[in-house]
Amino acid sequence: MRIIGNRGNTARKVQAVASGVLASGDTVIVNADGTVSVVAETPVSQAVGSPTVYESAYAYITAAAYDANAQKVVIAYRDNGNSDYGTAIVGTVSGTSISFGSPVVFESAGSGSISAAYDSNAQKVVIAYSDVGNSSYGTAIVGTVSGTSISFGSPVVFESATISATSATYDANAQKVVIAYRDNGNSFYGTAIVGTVSGTNISFGSATVFESADSSHISAVYDANAQKIAVFYQDGGNSDYGTAVVGTVSGTSISFGSPVVFESAGTASISAAYDANAQKIAVAYSDVGNSSYGTLIAGTVSGTSISFGSPLVFENAQTEYVASAYDDNSQKVVVAYLDAGNSGYGTSVVFQNAYASTNLTAENYIGIASNGYASGQAATINAKGFIDDNQSSLTAGQSYFVQTNGDLGLTAADPSVFAGTAVSATKLIVKG
């Protein structure tokens, strides 16, 4: 690679060997070997791995949340060996193993429909549940992790009626906890409520109905890209079809768009996880219309609605107690479930959402190709400070960013890479 510049002039060009074809005006990156390539995306196909048994016994799923501040896992469950009391325990991961502290009772009564979420702003764990000792009212409690233990504030009733199918999630944009649930006291309607954590307490706004019909198998998840809450559920008012609705939190309330069907058949055991890499929501469920086979579908939130791809079967057998989570390290979604086709064994699969992989990073953008070049040819790149005149349809005075597919845009992509500033419709002062 050779840098060309005039003495006293900060504007410069770069000469390097082209790796792949470059067209005049293309945005260009420098590769690790010093060659240059056009900024581009490569499609990565949807895929699911082979099922792996993790428990050779009948397996149920309980609620869990990761406390990012304490760097611990909190598992909440109904303790059948202690009068079905609501109980939580703190786990510490080390390598490929996990150790636990002592269990702590958060509700000295039968507890059902347990769900948990981590409030990263308050640095607290919120557990939502039905309090069997209080007419199965919808109740929430705030937990604080310290070392290998957890302590709790006082329980707060958020629904003075029997509830079930509880699912809690955290809206990082609004800094609120959202609890979606089946309101048995209101014709089993699908309902959601917004909670605000303060210290060891939580307060709630007014409940909002998102489905005026019997709703069950509810799973709520926060879409960080769209900054929306998506709720997935079995719609009893529409033949138990798998359905989704997008919610927007404002203050202490939540409003919803129109429901969208993702499975036109009976759907059960729904669990959703947000895939930050693909910027999609992976929805795992039991497809009752297809012998209750374990199935996955990807949803993309846009505004107050959501669209879906095609369903993908991950287990050719009856599947129950489905739970899913996103692994940020591997950038994959892990699905755990009870495999009724294999003695009810606890089983897991790894799912890769379809997405577009890009060769652009936050550091490797170098400039814009001055002309067209064949692969292997010495290419001249208009770099930092140089005015590239190979563009079109630009707006003078606007800042432009390199998009992951190589285009120029007015908003930053991910990663955010500043391309330069337009001085006319065809000219850009290169940042490079």
Image: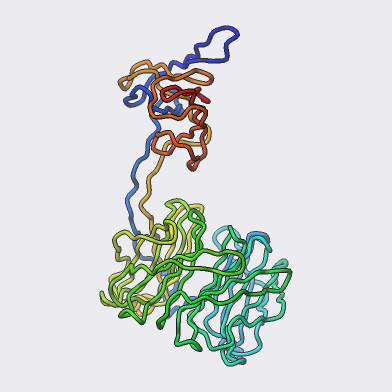
Task: Establish if 271 lies above or below 103.
Answer: above
In front of the other: 283 or 342: 283
Q: Position of residue 414 (x, y in %)?
A: 49, 43
In front of the other: 422 or 220: 422
Residue shown at 69%/68% (left/top)? 145
Task: Establish if 261 lies above or below 164.
Answer: above
Q: Position of residue 404 (x, y in %)?
A: 42, 39
Q: Position of residue 148 (x, y in %)?
A: 69, 69
Quarter location, residue 215: bottom left
Query: Is residue 253 found left or right of 428 in the rendered image?
Result: right
Residue shown at 54%/8% (left/top)? 6
What is the count of numbered marks?
0
Quarter location, residue 101: bottom right
Residue shown at 46%/30% (left/top)? 395
In front of the other: 303 or 101: 303
Query: Is residue 241 found left or right of 93 in the rendered image?
Result: left
**Way the structure is coloured:** rainbow
Query: Is residue 112 found left or right of 305 in the rendered image?
Result: right
Quarter location, residue 234: bottom left
Q: Position of residue 399 (x, y in %)?
A: 52, 32
Residue shown at 34%/59% (left/top)? 48
Query: Extreme top residue here?
Result: 7
Task: Establish if 422 lies above or below 355.
Answer: above
